[in-house]
Amino acid sequence: MAMNMNKLTEKAQEAIVAAQRLAEDRHHTQLEPEHLLHALAAQEDGVVPAILERLEIPPPTVLGGLEPALAGFARGSGPTQVQASNRFRRVFEAAAREAERLKDDYVSTEHFLLALADDAETGAAGQTLRRLGVTRDRLFE
């Protein structure tokens, strides 16, 4: 399944762009779910920070929780062409399935958050959310 950017809300597209920029700024060779969660939690006027606040989790706590993983990613030397990792693609596809299931026409930042919280294999992104108590069930509340 190709990652179709046209099926994303504007905020979701912005988050992907911010995630890519974060990966590039840190010279990472792969775009990972952790970059996406970082971008979502840091998004100005975004839905995800608002959701985190409602769950009484300050977004900076999420950002801090991701830092060890982000610091550990492989770095390229020189200008890096960032490629989406398989884990990132899985999260993207899971978010698209969430949107379908919820009968939404577009994939939004909330769908990404659900996919990140849900995927046991998302590594540090999913673990950070679970450790802070961000679960699928709590998100649906």
Image (cartoon, helix red, strand yellow):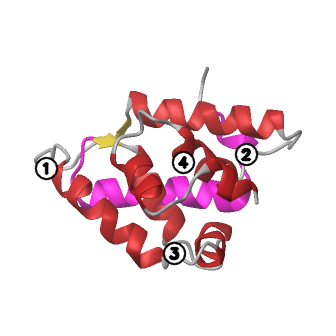
Residue type beneath disc 4: Ala
Q: Residue at x 25, y 41 (%)?
A: 29
Q: Position of residue 98 (x, y in %)?
A: 73, 38
How packed is label 1: few (under 14 Cα within 10 Å), some, or many (20 or more)?
A: few
* Mark 2: amino acid: Val
Q: Position of residue 88 (x, y in %)?
A: 45, 37
Mark nearer the N terminus (2 vs 3): 3
Q: Quadrant of residue 15?
A: bottom right
Q: CA distance from mark 2 to mark 4?
A: 16 Å
Q: Residues within 10 Å of mark 4 (few under 14, many from 20)?
A: many
Q: Along the polypeptide, which appears first: circle 2 or circle 1? A: 1
**What residue is pinned by disc 2?**
107
Q: Earlier in the sequence, mark 1 or mark 4?
A: 1
Q: Which residue is mark 1?
A: 78
Q: Is residue 77 left or right of residue 49?
A: left
Residue 19 visible here: no
Asked where in the image residue 128 lies, by quadrant, the reply is bottom left
The outermost residue toward the top is: 1
Marks 2 and 3: which is nearer the front?
Answer: 3
> Cα distance, mark 3 to mark 4?
14 Å
The residue labelled by disc 3 is 57
First in sequence: mark 2 vs mark 4? 2
* Rendering coords of residue 62 (x, y %): 41, 68
Residue 10 painted magenta: yes
> Label 3: how many residues lie within 10 Å, few (<14), some (14-19) or many (20+)?
some
Check if residue 67 falls in the magenta segment. no
Q: Tag on residue 117?
A: 4
The amino acid marked with disc number 1 is Gly
Dot 4 falls on a residue whose secondary structure is: helix
Disc 3 residue type?
Ile
Q: Which residues are magenta?
A: 4-29
